[in-house]
Amino acid sequence: MTPELRLEREQVEPTLRPLERASMLPPAAFTDQSVLDWELSSVFGREWICAAHASAVAEPGAYVMRELGDQSFFVIGGKDGRPRAFHNVCRHRGSRLFEQEEGRVRARITCPYHAWSYGFNGELLGARHTDGLEDFDPGCYGLVPVRVRVVAGLVLVDLDGAAEPAHEVVGELRGWLERYRTAQLRRGGERVYEVEANWKAIAENYNECLHCPGVHPELNALSAYDSGEEVTGAGAWCGGSMTLNDGAETMARNGGHAARRPIAGLEPRELRSVYYFVLFPNALVSLHPDYVMLHTLWPRSAGRTTVTCEWYFEPQTIAAEGFDPSDAIEFWDQVNREDWRVCELTQKGTRSRGYTAGRYTTHEADVHAFDSMIAARYLTALRSNAEVEA
Ligand code: FES
Ligand SMILES: [Fe+2]
């Protein structure tokens, strides 16, 4: 049963006005656990979410496991090279199958409880002491599949199975991901953070650089906070560019001097820019001249989010002798931590009796675009609640 969304239409409608007249999301959207429960059920549980980069499940038996509220699923590389996704639950007594976030199994998936085993395509391969059962068809006790699609290197899953086509959700962002060869890149580093802030506060923070001069002087020294332009197009995403300052070639330590060749085939303009996109709801994709950074957001409670941050490089770059991604990783690790600090301050502040929904500045078009995506979903739910009650 879908949890009730405990917001009022009057609290949500002001966000959907044009930016010049809009107000931010109501404080309860960040602090009320019932709102997060609704989001887990109705957004993360019914729309395409980004589970991982495709390279994480490219090998047979390589898997990623994710948790969302009380639900858990995994994506695993099939023997045919295609990923498949399943609910992370054994068909015997319901044990979780995978406990680790990432790993690789050799020949089959084996339940840690009584060792029922499954193929990478979900079929039940072994279940001891079931031979004498009546009406037991092993073919009916395979793993329960989850809809999965790979679009431009991102593994998207739809837990509900009825979301609109994934390619429509990614829309014109696909072209950007393909231009930066996102599917061909391979991971050169990963950091995982526990942030004491609502997942939307983290996405909002990513969507603006108004805070950069004060919070990230090192970032502002490489690309000015007010540089670049908004990018728009079909699909459930928002974002825009920032222009690299003269002398900077990428976002990295050592003054942004790229230690690597750029991603193959980029245009001169792309070599002078960094593009920041949010694919709703949980993927933040940052396209740099020489690498792609992918954050995925995993809400844990109204006030806590696990954030996975990964850095992807050209395979030849990773294979080159002396490959060292630490200039990019350490740069963004510092920026990330600076961001988490202000997100956590915001999370505390929005609980204050003294806070009511704020106003967007004219430098927060992407924050407004992101908030409008969630506000539109709130409003649809609140309207349909009102129709049921009428
Ligand atoms: S719960 Fe999985 S084998 Fe028993
Ligand atoms: Fe920031």
Image (tube, rainbow, N blue to C red):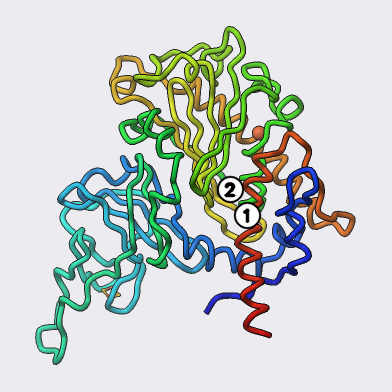
Left or right of 321, for residue 12: right
Rendering quadrant holding ligand 2:
top right
Which tag, 1 or 2, sits closer to the chain's start?
2
**Residue matched to label 1:** 304
Residue 384 found in image quarter: bottom right
Q: Position of residue 178 (x, y in %)?
A: 37, 33
Residue 9 found in image quarter: bottom right
Q: Nearer the viewer, residue 95 or 306?
A: 306
Quadrant of the image for the C terminus?
bottom right
Q: Position of residue 74 (x, y in %)?
A: 35, 58
CA–CA distance between discs 1 and 2? 7 Å
Amino acid on which disc 2 is placed: Glu
Q: Position of residue 215 (x, y in %)?
A: 73, 30
Q: Nearer the viewer, residue 381 or 283?
A: 381
Residue drawn at point x = 18 percent, y = 59 percent: 108
**Residue matched to label 2:** 194
